[in-house]
Image (tube, grey):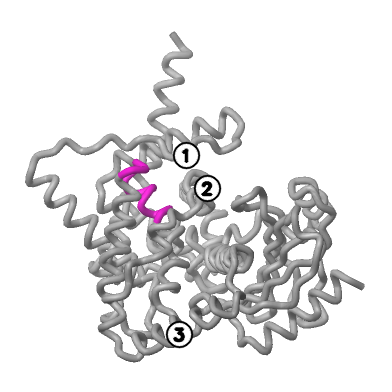
């Protein structure tokens, strides 16, 4: 079996996750590029038969976490969570919800966003997400719970502001 | 029931949202939610968050993968695995043979690429639990009319129930030269097959079945009068060939 070709089958998913995580196409594709380079280099270390998706997402998480550490060290202001692909053919109202959620997602902590995306978008089990992020499953659950709650608060907050305007 | 629903925890609610609960526990949580409208609303919002994430980011899956990601400079990586390096030399030798026989040309390169794209589309969409297809089998007439219109060719959906594979549905995907249709099938064990179909305007011809292996995905592909087909599955080559023959017969009764 060709392991390098096997890596290629995971690229669209890595890219989707990176786009949601960074909120920016260029940084996302850089992250995928770095992940692939490291994966190709370390392919010999990958245990054949083990879960390749988990292995690749672990590599991506490690690179992302390192970048965050470096950014925080250099005091770089966080990049704005720019809109992803909003060319989706959605009715106006749906498009607003999409934009709101994308914005709210960018306001979560990076740690919460990672958990929320691995579970909600990548549909990993809590055990898999814990393994990929190298944290206990209890931490996955508390980040998931807080992340979802904050998203909910932010989304309803946006609604409340609109309502106030209407009243005036 | 009350005693079992009283201890529904925060963890249960999230596992309910993510579809990670065993059937019995899921039912208990549902009973609990009926009795607790506020929690029910919260769960609904969380489910909507998941759906919105998919609506926002699933389009990324269909973006064409840059060539630099498909062709790693992997020569020196392979040196780390002697067996793989040996295999590589055998492949190089084999390819040279092809070239010398004059078999290798642009056309076959395009066909190999077609098989690869079919395998990638298979690998991307078959693991999807919530969104495996855009249009489900229940709306088969709509599905076939819609995709026929987009591909500019009358399509047929072969029925494979006799082999134990039921139609799940289909979706439209972007290809190199226009839209591509993907039909998905599933057997009772959850094993999935996909049939990938594109219009090939210049190909007023037929080809024999060709085989490609991309990672764990096996692909048989062929051209049949202006349409190119690729059948992909994580199955043994012989088993997939048996199914490919049936697909071909159903398409050409």
Which of pointers 3 and 2 lies earlier in the amino acid sequence? 2
Residue A77, above or below A135: above
Can residue B175 be spotted in the picture?
A: yes
Q: Residue at x 47, y 67 (%)?
A: A9
Residue beneath label 2, please?
B59
- Callout 3–callout 2 Cβ contact below 8 Å: no
Q: Quadrant of residue B7?
A: bottom left
What is the span of residues highlighted in magenta in the rendered image? Answer: A15-26
Quarter the N terminus of chain B occupies: bottom right
Residue B41 vertical position relative to residue A93 in the rendered view, above or below: below
Disc 3 versus disc 1: nearer the observer: 3
Q: Which residue is mark 3?
A: B93
Residue shown at 28% from the left, 34% from the top: A80
Q: Is residue B146 shown in magenta?
A: no
Residue labelled with disc 1: A85
Location of residue A20 in the rendering, given as x and y in whole percent from the top left corner: 38, 48
Question: What chain is tagged by disc 3?
Answer: B
Whether residue A136 sits left or right of residue A119 in the image: it is left
To the question of a shared chain for discs 3 and 1, the answer is: no
Return the residue nearer the eye: B94 or B64. Answer: B94
> Could one spot residue B47 in this view of the protein?
no
Q: CA distance from mark 3 to mark 2?
A: 40 Å
Magenta segment main secondary structure: helix
User: Residue B31 vs residue A47: left or right?
Assistant: right
Q: Residues within 10 Å of mark 3 (few under 14, many from 20)?
A: few
Task: Locate the C terminus of chain B by quadrant.
Answer: bottom right
Q: Secondary structure at mark 1?
A: loop
How far from the left and from the top, in percent, is residue A93?
Answer: 56, 29
In front of the other: B52 or B84: B84
Closest to the camera, between mark 3 and mark 2, is 3
Do callouts 1 and 2 point to residues on the same chain?
no
> Marks 3 and 1, how far apart in space?
44 Å
């Amino acid at each position: 079996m060709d392991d390098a070709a096997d890596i290629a089958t995971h690229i669209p998913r890595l890219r989707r996750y990176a786009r949601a995580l960074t909120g920016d196409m260029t940084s996302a594709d850089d992250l995928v590029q770095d992940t692939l380079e490291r994966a190709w280099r370390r392919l010999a270390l990958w245990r054949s038969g083990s879960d390749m998706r988990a292995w690749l997402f672990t590599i991506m998480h490690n690179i992302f976490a390192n970048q965050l550490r470096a950014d925080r060290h250099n005091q770089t202001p966080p990049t704005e969570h720019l809109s992803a692909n909003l060319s989706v053919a959605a009715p106006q109202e749906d498009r607003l919800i999409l934009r709101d959620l994308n914005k709210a997602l960018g306001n979560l902590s990076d740690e919460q966003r990672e958990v929320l995306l691995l579970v909600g978008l990548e549909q990993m089990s809590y055990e898999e997400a814990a393994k990929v992020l190298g944290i206990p499953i209890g931490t996955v659950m508390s980040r998931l719970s807080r992340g979802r709650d904050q998203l909910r608060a932010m989304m309803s907050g946006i609604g409340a502001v609109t309502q106030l305007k209407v009243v005036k | 029931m009350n005693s079992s629903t009283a201890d529904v925890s925060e963890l249960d609610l999230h596992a309910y949202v993510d579809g990670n609960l065993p059937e019995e526990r899921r039912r208990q949580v549902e009973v609990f939610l009926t009795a607790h409208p506020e929690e029910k609303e919260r769960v609904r919002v969380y489910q909507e968050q998941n759906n919105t994430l998919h609506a926002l980011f699933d389009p990324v899956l269909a973006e064409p993968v840059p060539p630099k990601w498909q062709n790693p400079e992997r020569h020196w990586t392979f040196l780390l695995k002697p067996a793989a390096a040996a295999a590589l030399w055998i492949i190089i030798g084999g390819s040279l043979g092809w070239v010398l026989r004059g078999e290798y040309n642009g056309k076959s390169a395009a066909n190999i690429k077609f098989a690869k794209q079919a395998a990638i589309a298979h690998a991307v969409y078959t693991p999807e639990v919530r969104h495996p297809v855009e249009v489900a089998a229940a709306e088969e007439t709509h599905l076939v009319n819609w995709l026929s219109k987009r591909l500019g060719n009358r399509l047929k959906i072969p029925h494979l129930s006799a082999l134990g594979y039921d139609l799940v549905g289909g979706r439209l995907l972007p290809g190199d030269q226009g839209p591509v249709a993907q039909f998905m099938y599933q057997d009772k064990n959850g094993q999935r097959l996909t049939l990938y179909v594109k219009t090939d305007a210049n190909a007023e011809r037929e080809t024999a079945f060709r085989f490609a292996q991309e990672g764990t995905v096996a692909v048989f592909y062929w051209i049949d009068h202006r349409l190119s087909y690729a059948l992909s599955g994580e199955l043994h080559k012989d088993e997939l060939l048996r199914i490919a023959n049936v697909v071909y017969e159903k398409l050409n009764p």
